[in-house]
Structure formats: C-alpha cells, structure tokens
Image (cartoon, rainbow, N blue to C red):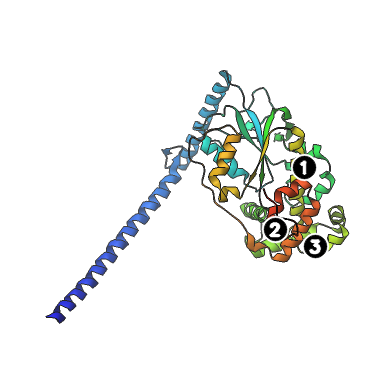
C-alpha cells in the first residue's frame, strides 16, 4: 500500500511540475508580449498622445512646439522679467547633456544654450542665449535663473588639441568662445553681464578622454566612415596611437618639458589630457574674473550621492523640484589604462595644471602621484 501511494504521489508531483512549468511559460510569454507592446506603444507616444503614423507624429510634434513657442512668447510679453544666466561650464563629455536634462525634468522649466532658436532668453539681448531646442514644449520658463550650456568651443574641437599651444595664455579667446553662437555663418556674442552665476562641471579626466573617443566613434559611424575605430579598448588604443602621432616634435616642445618627453608615448591620446587641463585652467580664471557666485559639481557625484548633488544644484539655481529627475546611467572606464599610463598621465597633468585646477582633480590621480591626499 505504501509502495502504491508513493508511486501515485511521485506521478502527481511530476504532473504538477509540468503544469506549473506550463503556467510559468505562458505567464512569461504573456509578460514578454505585454512589455513588447508597452515599448511599442512608447515609440508611438508624442507628448502624451499615441500616434501610429510616423509622418503624423512628426507633424504633431512640430505643431505642439510651434504652439509652445507662441505661448512662451506671450508669457515674455506679459510683465516677464528675464532670468539671470547661470553658465554651465563643462568640458565636452563631462555630463553636460544629463545635467541640462535632469534640471529641466526636475523643475519642469526650460534650460538654454547659444544655439539659435525662436525663443530668446532675454528679448532685449538679440545675440542670445536662446531657450534650448530640446526643451519639452509642455514646460515653462524659469523665473529667476536659467542654466545655460557653455562648452567654450575654441578649445574643444576634437583632434585639434595642439592649437591650444597658441591659445593657452590668452584668456580672452576662451572667454569669447564661452558665449559665442552662430547662425547663417555669422558669429555673435551675448553680453557677459547677463551671467549671474556659474556651475563648473568636472569629470574624471581618464573617463572623459575615453568618453570623447566613444562619442567620436558614434559620429564616425553616423556618417559611415570606413576608418572608424572599433568601440572597444583595443579600438581606443589604436585611435590614440594615431592621435599621438599628430603631435609632432614641434607641438610637443610647446607643452612638454624635455625631461617628460618619454611620458607622452605612454599616455593614450596625450593631447586630449593637455586640452582637458588647459580648458579647466582657463575656466577657473574666467570664474574668478567674473566674481559671480559659483559651485563645482562632479559628474561622479550623480552616481555616488545623487540626491545630495541634485539638492545642491537646484538650491544654487533657486529652483524647486516638482518632478522626478531623469534617470542617471553611470559609465567609467578603468580597464582602458594600465598603471604605467595612469602614472605618466598624472605627472603630465600636474605639470600643466594651475594650483586651482590641480586642487579640483588631484583626487582622481591618487595613488598615481606622490602628493598628499586631497579632499574635495
């Protein structure tokens, strides 16, 4: 009797297991279909409206933006005091796009840049800056301060770091580039007196150089360039080998001491580290010259202490958080450098940096330099 019961129990357990397996499979399939539908539906959503046809989506998007521009122009005409400019000084690929996006999302207010659009931040300043073209048309204009993108492009054009040898000691060139825009082939500058505050955004230089390579990789593949390097550690080093060859002995003489020349070959994309340092040297000089209130924001702090960083940033902008900030996706690239490259780069960067710049980035170098531990 015991034998029969055990057999029946075993058969029942096998059948039960199969049934459970079928139920789980059906549930997973249903969930997968549901997730696919959600993703599919999200692709059709334009400002909260679901539109299947691509042309109709584009037309609706343009219509909404056009109405938003007219609405916001009406706000400006109705006893509106233009906000003060808070320049977001950031070397390219330091988290600029994310910072602008998350501030805009959290406050439901537009940010700005030098790129010309239909909507000036200050209608009495015809040379800009302008409210950002990517601002959600459902958002409003900021009341007191607007965060303004500023890469200071004179010093950030990719693969031309050697030109800094002519510009490194001319702060006016840097300053002009920080508030320059272009339209129809004509350059224009807005009045620096509009700048009331500064946010200085800083990223680990080792990660920044890799990120700039990966950004360049995306741009190359957008244009189907045959000589685009692989978006890998190996591709980075192949690219940087060519990058280092660009810097002839003449250029190296301009920014490397004779006793440090052997270090250049050990540092991938050495010229990019040079540009990073000189850019921040000039940025700090300009911040001091304007004498406007300023804060430093580290890209890594979005990952390590997100809430505190957002609170500090919004408090400085005198803005309230009315919605959840944008999601942050952390990227770093420690595997792209060996110890020898890091140490060589740290020595060179310390040589190029002013005391103020070194104080901001020294913690990224440890333990690759013999300096005492720095605190932020």
SS assignment at label 3:
helix
Task: Where is residue 325? Give x, y as percent.
Answer: 51, 41
Residue lying at 36% horizontally and 52% vertically, measured from the top left: 34
Residue lying at 39% horizontally and 48% vertically, measured from the top left: 38
Residue placed under numbered mark 3 in the picture: 263
The foreground one among 295 and 348 is 295
- Which badge, 1 or 2, is on the more N-terminal residue? 1
Residue neighbourhood size for the residue with mark 2, other residues' Cα within 10 Å, grouped as few (<14), some (14–19), many (≥20): some
Residue neighbourhood size for the residue with mark 1, other residues' Cα within 10 Å, grouped as few (<14), some (14–19), many (≥20): many
Kindly report which numbered mark, 3 or 2, lies closer to the viewer in this rendering.
2
SS assignment at label 2:
loop
Give the distance between the C-alpha atoms of the residues marked 3 and 1, in whole angstroms. 24 Å
Residue placed under numbered mark 2 in the picture: 366
- Which badge, 3 or 2, is on the more N-terminal residue? 3
Farthest residue to the top: give it. Answer: 79
Farthest residue to the left: give it. Answer: 1
Residue placed under numbered mark 1 in the picture: 282
Give the distance between the C-alpha atoms of the residues marked 1 and 2, in whole angstroms. 24 Å
Task: Where is residue 92? Give x, y as percent.
Answer: 67, 46
Task: Where is residue 265? Give x, y as percent.
Answer: 78, 63
Residue neighbourhood size for the residue with mark 3, other residues' Cα within 10 Å, grouped as few (<14), some (14–19), many (≥20): some
């Amino acid at each position: 009797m015991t034998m029969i019961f055990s057999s029946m129990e075993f058969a029942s357990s096998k059948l039960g297991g199969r049934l459970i397996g079928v139920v789980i499979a059906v549930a997973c399939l249903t969930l997968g279909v549901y997730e696919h539908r959600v993703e599919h539906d999200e692709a059709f959503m334009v400002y909260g409206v679901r539109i299947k046809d691509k042309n109709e989506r584009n037309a609706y998007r343009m219509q909404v933006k056009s109405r938003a521009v007219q609405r916001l122009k009406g706000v400006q005409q109705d006893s509106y005091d233009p906000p003060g400019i808070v320049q977001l000084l950031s070397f390219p690929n330091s988290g600029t796009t994310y910072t602008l996006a998350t501030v805009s999302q959290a406050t439901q207010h537009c940010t700005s840049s030098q790129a010309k659009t239909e909507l000036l931040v200050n209608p009495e300043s015809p040379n800009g800056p302008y409210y950002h073209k990517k601002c959600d048309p459902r958002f409003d204009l900021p009341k007191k301060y607007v965060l303004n993108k500023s890469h200071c492009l004179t010093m950030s054009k990719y693969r031309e770091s050697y030109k800094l040898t002519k510009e490194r000691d001319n702060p006016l060139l840097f300053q002009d580039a920080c508030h320059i825009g272009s339209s129809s082939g004509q350059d224009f500058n807005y009045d620096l007196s509009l700048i009331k505050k500064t946010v200085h955004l800083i990223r680990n230089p080792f990660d920044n150089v890799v990120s700039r390579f990966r950004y360049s990789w995306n741009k190359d593949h957008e244009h189907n360039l045959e000589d685009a390097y692989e978006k890998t550690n190996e591709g980075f080093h192949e690219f940087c080998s060519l990058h280092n060859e660009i810097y002839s002995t003449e250029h190296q003489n301009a920014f490397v001491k004779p006793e440090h020349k052997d270090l250049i070959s050990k540092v991938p994309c050495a010229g990019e580290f040079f540009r990073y340092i000189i850019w921040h040297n000039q940025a700090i000089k300009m911040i001091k010259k304007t004498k406007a209130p300023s804060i430093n924001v580290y890209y890594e702090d979005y990952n390590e202490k997100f809430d505190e960083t957002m609170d500090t940033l919004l408090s400085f902008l005198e803005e309230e958080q009315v919605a959840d900030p944008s999601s942050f996706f952390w990227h770093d690239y420690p595997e792209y450098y060996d110890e020898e490259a890091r140490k060589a780069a740290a020595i060179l960067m310390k040589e190029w940096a002013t005391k103020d710049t070194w104080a901001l980035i020294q913690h990224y170098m440890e333990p690759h330099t013999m300096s005492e531990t720095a605190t932020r």
